[in-house]
Image (tube, rainbow, N blue to C red):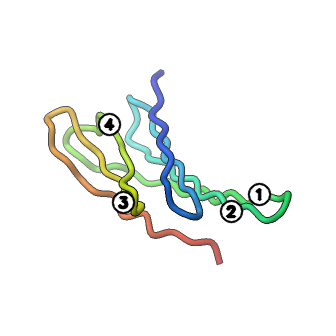
């Protein structure tokens, strides 16, 4: 199984994870406080006719995905732990 991992350049960092043969996208938001780390896990079902082929983060925290046909999509990732 092939996994896609990408890390954002934002604060807090967000790591995206998706298996190549899966329709589930996981986002991991990482908060660090001194020596402690809080990880927030969010799971999304990707409802696309063609599953994503590649992921990349923009410098301002927008997650882009490209499917096998070359179509580009954005993923809203405005997540915060309260």
Q: Residue 31 carries which label?
A: 2
Q: Residues within 10 Å of mark 2 (few under 14, many from 20)?
A: some
Q: Position of residue 68 (x, y in %)?
A: 20, 32
Instruction: From the viewer's perspective, tell me whether residue 29 is left or right of residue 65.
Output: right
State how far apart marks 3 and 1 are (Cα). Answer: 23 Å
State how far apart marks 3 and 4 are (Cα). Answer: 14 Å
Is the C terminus in the top left, top right, bottom left or bottom right quadrant?
bottom right
Disc 1 or 2, which lies upstream in sequence? 2
State how far apart marks 4 and 1 are (Cα). Answer: 28 Å
Disc 3 or 1, which lies upstream in sequence? 1
Question: To which residue does mark 4 refer?
Answer: 54
Question: To which residue does mark 3 refer?
Answer: 62
Q: Residues within 10 Å of mark 3 (few under 14, many from 20)?
A: some
Q: Which mark is residue 37?
A: 1
Q: Position of residue 25 (x, y in %)?
A: 44, 47
| Circle 4 SS class | strand
């Amino acid at each position: 199984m092939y996994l896609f991992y990408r890390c954002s350049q934002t604060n807090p960092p967000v790591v995206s994870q998706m298996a190549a043969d899966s329709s589930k996208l996981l986002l991991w938001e990482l908060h660090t406080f001194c020596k402690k780390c809080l990880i927030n896990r969010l799971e999304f079902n990707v409802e696309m006719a063609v599953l994503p082929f590649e992921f990349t983060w923009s410098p301002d925290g927008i997650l882009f995905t490209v499917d096998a046909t070359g179509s580009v999509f954005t993923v809203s990732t405005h997540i915060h732990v309260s």
